[in-house]
Structure formats: C-alpha cells, structure tokens
Image (cartoon, rainbow, N blue to C red):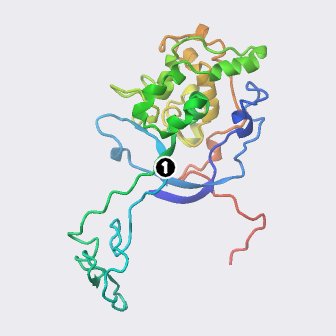
Amino acid sequence: RMFVGQRKDSFVFNLGEGFDLVNVTNPLGPEDAEQDDLARKNVTSFILEVPIACLIASSPIVGGWTTASFGVGGPATGGGGGGVAPCPPGQPGAPKPADGPGLRWVPDQSCQGWVPDNHPGRRGGAGAPPAPTPAQGTQVSRLGSPLVNEIVIGLPDKDLFNSAHPTQDGALAVYVTNPTFPELLEILFGGVGVRAPNNFPRNDLVAAFLTGIEGLNKPANVVPSEMLRLNTSIAATPAGAQHRLGALGGDNAGFPNGRRPGDDVIDITLRVAMGALCHAMPGAFQCGPMDAPSGDLPFTDGAFLDASFFTAQFPYLQTPLRGSPNATPVP
C-alpha cells in the first residue's frame, strides 16, 4: 500500500535547545518537561507498506537510507509516451487531427506524423527508442539513522557527509570512533556529574551507526556504512506494548533495529552517545560501565514521544492539523 499526502509531523524534538549549541537547560530532567517545536506542523508524507518477501534475499537484515538532490532530473514526458523525450519543437510538421470521443492523436515514434494514442507506433509504444537517462542532480542531503549528521559528523564535513554514498563512510569514521559531542556535554554539565565515555575507539558507536549490533541487526560480512538497518526476522511489537526507548528499553523490534514512529530516537541517541551500550552489553564493544560513567543516566531533550502519538493502522501518522481555527461544516 502507498499513501502520499499531508499528515501531522511525526518528529518530536526540542529543536531550539537541541541544535542551538546544545543549549539545553537540563539534559537529565523530566522526559516531558520541554516543548516539541514541531508539534503544530504538518508534513508531506510518502508512506509505503511493503511485504517483507519483497525486501529480503539471503539475509533477513536490510539497510536503507534516503537522499535529496537538487537540480535537473526526472524522466522526460510528452508526445503520448511516458518516460520518452518529447518531440522537437515544430514536430510533427503536419497539422494535428481533431481529437474526438474516445480518440486522442499523439506523435508517432519518428515525430513525423500523428497516430491514435492506443496505436503501437505511437511515440513511446512498442519499438520506440529508449528514453534518455535523466540527469540525477546534485545530492544535498542524506538520512539513515537520525542525528548522525547533526551530532556525530563534525562541522567541516557535514556537507561532505550529506553528499556521500554510504560506501564512502570510511573516510568519516573518525567522527564515530572519536566523537566530540559527549565531550561537549561534559564541558557543559560536568558540574552536575556528567562524564563523557573514555573508551577509544568508540566501538559501541561503530556498531550503533556503522555496522549494526551483533545479534540484533548486524548483517554478515558488513562493510561499515551509515544507514538504518532492520532485522525482519524479529517480530513487530504491538503498538500498545512498544517501549519508547526501543532496544535500550528491552524492545528489540525498535530503534536502532529499524525506526518506528513512536521510538524516541532523540533520547535513545543521546543515551547511546553517552555510553548506554557499554552498560547494556558490557564487554561486547570492548567497553563496560567503568568506561562510560554517565552511560546509565536518563539523558533526554525533554520532548516526550511514544507509540500513543500515532494510530495502529496504516498510514499510522495522524490526520494533519486544519489550516483554519474555524470548523468548516460538512455540506
């Protein structure tokens, strides 16, 4: 199934304090004490529901990411043949016959004359020349797991990450193995006991962001690359039983094993960055609780999210907010 249209924005984030040089007042405060800066927003949504059998081959683990590109692109259309370049200006040279009921005239394959739109010799019909390869434009944004570019990748290379393919991520791995964000939190909040992890390289973050976690969503023979990975062999947790902290909360069907709408990815990412995996899986990443003194603290942006914010039926995201405060009577 597919849905394309407006829905209420599903991303919950204390945006100003989170991105304004980590201008948070209390990263260890209540999980619901701050505002969601996106609460009154709608977003154009492209929602697909795809059978698992259409996604997997030899492994139940799949990985994916999205990109956005700027510039020319997309298949050319026109002349009665979708995906085929339009005829040059002024062709066909002969006048177009008048369309009639159930009859529409379109250019033929050579652009020299006109044929009915159901004729095999129409432009784009059987035997038509292949459509030209559309230009791809310039990739300007990329997203797999949330917040990687925002809090993991350093400022000098954020544009490079946004324009790169995951196979190129080895060149940026130092931002994962030796991150600056935890040090920044210690500088800001060391006075209340916040301490950055000291296990370098941060193999726990390599697993979380680049390879997947062993026994959860790490595929065989994986090449380190940043993407969102999902183990389709793990059964989905019913909406009413989902834990907002995903795998950190003992719900292995949640982030970072995929990403459900109700997973509080902000709080999860903050806690993982500060060493939560060193506490949850001591020794698995050559680190333990002693290497991450603050790894068991409940870091939060203060904007609460869980599965109750969404519906349990497709397309899952809530009905968009009305554009007017005045109710419109149904005719």
Residue furthest to the top: 290
Could you tell whether 275 is left or right of 163 in the image? right
Image location (x, y in percent) of residue 249: 58, 27
**Residue type at tag 1:** Ser
Image location (x, y in percent) of residue 37: 73, 44
Depicted 3 relative to depicted 184: above or below: below
Image quadrant where one finds the N terminus: bottom left
Could you tell whether 176 is left or right of 20 in the image? left
Image location (x, y in percent) of residue 181: 63, 23
User: Residue at the spot x=33%, y=40% of the render?
Assistant: 56
In this view, the residue in front, 13 or 58, is 13
User: Residue at the spot x=52%, y=17% of the render?
Assistant: 202
Could you tell whether 303 is left or right of 175 in the image? right
In this view, the residue in front, 301 or 142, is 142
Depicted 136 relative to depicted 303: above or below: below
From where the camera sits, is residue 80 visible? yes
Could you tell whether 71 is left or right of 305 in the image? left
Image location (x, y in percent) of residue 109: 25, 74
Residue hosting label 1: 69
Image quadrant where one finds the C terminus: bottom right
User: Residue at the spot x=48%, y=22% of the render?
Assistant: 206
